[in-house]
Image: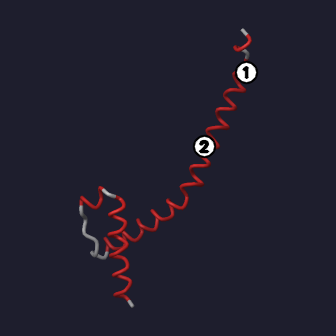
Amino acid sequence: MGNDSISKTFAVALALCVVCAVVVSSAAVILRPTQEVNKLLDLKTNILASAGLLRARASLLKLNLSRSVHVLSIWRQAVLLMR
C-alpha cells in the first residue's frame, strides 16, 4: 500500500519528465552542428538544382554521404567558374 500513494506517483512522473527533458535537450545541442551542415547542404543543393547544374541521381540520393560529396564538388566547381 505504501507504493500506491499519490505523492510517489507524482514524484515518479516528475522524475520521468525531467529525464526526458534532459535527453531531448542534450540531443538538440549535440545535433546542432549536423543540422547547420545539412541546412547549408540543402541550400546549395537547391541553388544547383535551380541553375540546372545538379542532375537527380537515385543512387546519390540513397547515400547521403555520396550526395553531400557530389553536391559540394559541384558547388566548388560553380564557385570556381564564377571567379
The correct choice, above or below, for 16 with respect to 5 in the image is below
Q: Residue at x 40, y 71 (%)?
A: 44
Q: Are marks 1 and 2 in contact (CB under 8 Å)?
A: no
- Measuring from the top left, give residue 19's x and y in whole percent: 65, 37
**Rendered residue at 24%/63% (across/down):** 57
Q: Earlier in the sequence, mark 1 or mark 2?
A: 1
In-front residue for pair 27/55: 27
Percent x, y for residue 59?
A: 24, 59
Amino acid of disc 2:
Val
Q: Residues within 10 Å of mark 1 (few under 14, many from 20)?
A: few
Q: CA distance from mark 1 to mark 2?
A: 23 Å
Above or below residue 3? Residue 47 is below
Q: Position of residue 73 (x, y in %)?
A: 34, 75
SS class, disc 2: helix
- Residue at 27% across / 75% down in the picture? 52
For the rendered model, the colour scheme is: secondary structure
Viewer-side residue, 66 vs 54: 66
Please state if 19 lies on the left or on the right of 34 as rendered: right
Numbered mark located on residue 23 in the image: 2
* Residue 55 occupies quadrant: bottom left
Tally of numbered tags: 2
Q: Quadrant of the N terminus?
A: top right
The quadrant where residue 71 appears: bottom left
Please state if 46 lies on the left or on the right of 58 as rendered: right
Q: Is residue 75 left or right of residue 14?
A: left
Give the amino acid at mark 1: Lys
In percent of width and height, residue 5 lies at 73, 15
Q: Residue furthest top?
A: 1
- The residue indicated by pointer 1 is 8
**Badge 1 element:** helix
Query: Few, some or many C-alpha atoms within 10 Å of disc 2 (few <14, some 14-19, many ≥20)?
Result: few
